[in-house]
Amino acid sequence: DAGVIQSPRHEVTEMGQEVTLRCKPISGHNSLFWYRQTMMRGLELLIYFNNNVPIDDSGMPEDRFSAKMPNASFSTLKIQPSEPRDSAVYFCASTPGQGAPSSYEQYFGPGTRLTVT
Amino acid sequence: GDSVTQMEGPVTLSEEAFLTINCTYTATGYPSLFWYVQYPGEGLQLLLKATKADDKGSNKGFEATYRKETTSFHLEKGSVQVSDSAVYFCALSDLGNSGGYQKVTFGTGTKLQVIP
């Protein structure tokens, strides 16, 4: 099993540019989560998909952020336009099931370190 | 809503010392509890979990017991090693009022540094 795959691993861009982060969940997992991690705010849930449908996007900071999951094996998180305060590590995670039980663990990808200058 | 509170770090210990990282929670339903570990430059990975009251999760010498009466899930290890240096996250997973969907809440993380 290859685990959760994220690309790119590092992204450096200038303010105002569009940034697209990519995630491939573990095959067979039907829930996918996007998180952002910073020193100041810790680990924040941005959005959560179940069976490719967005369930909870209340964590998306503003309209500059959007996420899609066109199929079960691929998701994107897009920031347009990017700002320096978006600099963070962005993680994607997946779980094998949904609903009961709540005991499913999350499988995290290695993250994308985004730097916006 | 659900919340997880864990002790502030960083925690610095000498090798072979005893480790405790405190974690308490509030939840509306009957959550499952987890400890995740994050090594430098990596994503979080599951360390151990417990799914009901009085369950004990254990892995790699780490243990935590689900205490419903004190709403706690403290992480312990009898003898830490330099290789245990990492950030540790307490988390809960609850269906609660989320419409039947799993909702996961993480603590802020506790950085552990073990010195030789």
Image: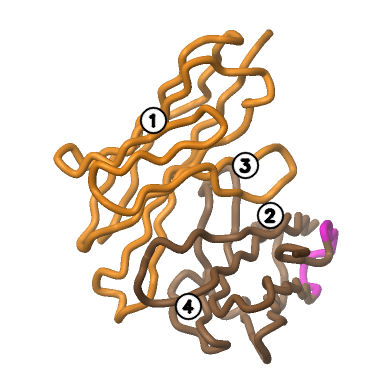
Please report whichever mark, 2 or 4, sits nearer to the chain's N-terminal start. 4
User: Residue B7 has which mark?
Assistant: 1
Judged by depth in the image, the label closer to the viewer, 2 or 1, is: 1
Q: Name the residue under label 2.
A: A89
x 64%, y 65%: residue: A92
x 68%, y 24%: residue: B83
x 52%, y 36%: residue: B59
Q: Residue B27: horizontal and vertical position, in percent?
A: 24, 56
Amino acid type of the residue that numbered disc 1 sits on in the rendered structure: Met
Q: In this view, does B54 lie to the left or right of A48?
A: left
Q: Same chain, marks 4 and 1?
A: no
Q: Residue A48: horizontal and vertical position, in percent?
A: 51, 75
Q: In which quarter of the image is the C terminus of chain A?
A: bottom right
x 46%, y 37%: residue: B58
Q: What's the image's color scheme?
A: by chain
User: Residue B38 has which mark?
Assistant: 3
Residue at mark 4 to residue at mark 1: CA–CA distance: 29 Å
Name the element at disc 2: strand
Say which colour chain A has: brown
Residue at mark 2 to residue at mark 3: CA–CA distance: 13 Å
Q: In which quarter of the image is the N terminus of chain A?
A: bottom right
Q: Name the residue under label 4.
A: A57
Q: Residue A19: horizontal and vertical position, in percent?
A: 78, 73
* A99, A5: nearer the viewer: A99
Residue range corresponding to the magenta coloring: A9-17
Amino acid type of the residue that numbered disc 4 sits on in the rendered structure: Asp
